[in-house]
Amino acid sequence: MQKIAVIFPGQGSHFVGMYKALYDEYEIVRETIDEAKQVTGIDLCELCFNGPLSLLSRVENAHVAILAFGVAAFRVFVNETGLTPQFCAGHSLGEYTALVISGAIKFPEALKLVKKRCEISKNIQKVFDGVMTIIDGVETDIVYDICKKQQLDNKKVYLSCYNSSTQTAISGINVDVEYTEKILLKKNGTVSPLFNSAPFHCPIMEDGIELLKNVISDIEFGDFRYPVMSNYTGKPYVKSKDNIKENLLNHLTNPVRWQDNMRYFEKKAVDLVIDFSAKNIFENINSDFKSLKVICFGVRKEREALFGLLQDVKYSSNKATFISKSILAAISTQNNNFNREEYNTGSVNNYMRLLEIRDELEMGSISYTQDVKKKILNLLKNIFDTKKTCIYEQNMWIQQIIDETASNYQHLI
């Protein structure tokens, strides 16, 4: 089986016009962005397509936009290809997007969490005059040593992202970061400050941990459908809800170990990495890892090439459809009803009807309209009820089917 990983961008990846073509082309993107607007009150279409950049770049706007459009783009991918990834990763803020598409956090909850995280970070930024900047063209070890030397001189500047062998980010107090930037410029580095950014992924953000913990404690986390890489550990999340909380809190104050994430992909023989940024954000960052073929879903030309590539039979084992997932759910749930007549009427008969719909879809006599999907879910619900499947497990299966096939939940249930 060919292994696919999906990756999502973080702060600094926004620009006016981002994802406009995708929004115009796919209804599911419009539905997702409308859902985000209902949750956050932010008019992402106006901000992302018309600007101005100064308003879009406000952390509370940019971060919500990056999260929402990342989720929307992934929903297009699943809806168009029927494929599911073997691994997910998100750079910095993008880790929240990865957790959403994996099923660990519901989309509305993630939007609220990211919005609150922005409020916390803005307050810390103001109190400490904190900043974050990208450094290109200087080897990671050199940047690390320079930051450590500044810390010995009581300066608050830290290496906050290990992006590639020659790209890092540093965070800290503005005056100390500026001083360090001058040193790095003398090393022939390039300095790109992140406009309006808080000093993420460094100890200055420690004051935000308790505040973020209070928000996270109210979230009901779900089960992982596929592995998500942690920026904090450089390894996949352990399948534990406490581990999600721990990683997201440490994510605030510890560096992003992106290179470790990509090394893990190489170790696991990932063949294809799909970048869900709007404009090849990962093209240079991932250049150290030659075995990882990276295609940007947000660029139309690359997206079309990707769709063609995924028609290859070698990716067929990754594919699943709305009906195949529903049939799997029907046969995977335990039967708790031992009345044979009831079981035959409510379970076996409805299951046979699911098989008939599968055959009709494969022959092309019907297509995946919302009405057909509703009919499939109603049959599945009848099977669940007959088997006396608990409501929690029913909802888990249905939510998973809808999420993994990028079907609009509001229209189906």
Image (spheres, grey):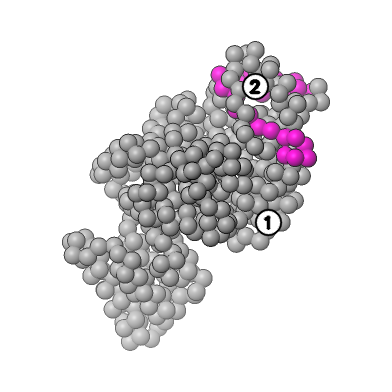
Q: Residue at x 71, y 26 (%)?
A: 177
The residue indicated by pointer 2 is: 143
Q: Amino acid at mark 1?
A: Val
Q: Residue at x 56, y 48 (%)?
A: 64
Residue 367: numbered disc: none
Looking at the image, residue 64 lies above or below residue 180: below
Q: Amino acid at mark 2?
A: Val
Looking at the image, residue 381 lies above or below residue 118: below
Residue 125 lies, in percent from the top left, at: 72, 39
Residue at the right extreme of this rendering? 154
Q: Is residue 291 left or right of residue 41?
A: left
Q: Looking at the image, can residue 61 be seen?
A: yes
SS at mark 2? helix
Q: Quadrant of residue 296?
A: top left
In this view, the residue in front, 275 or 272, is 275
User: Which quarter shows the C terminus?
Assistant: bottom left
Q: Quadrant of residue 410?
A: bottom left
The residue indicated by pointer 1 is: 215
SS at mark 1? helix
Q: Could you tell me what secondary structure mostly forms the magenta stretch? A: helix
User: Which quarter shows the N terminus?
Assistant: top left
Mark 1 or mark 2, which is nearer the start of the sequence?
2
Residue 347 among those drawn in magenta: no
Q: Residue at x 47, y 54 (%)?
A: 33
Q: Residue at x 42, y 79 (%)?
A: 385
**Crowding at mark 2 (Cα within 10 Å: few <14, some 14-19, many 20+):** many
Residue 128 among those drawn in magenta: yes
Looking at the image, residue 255 lies above or below residue 378: above
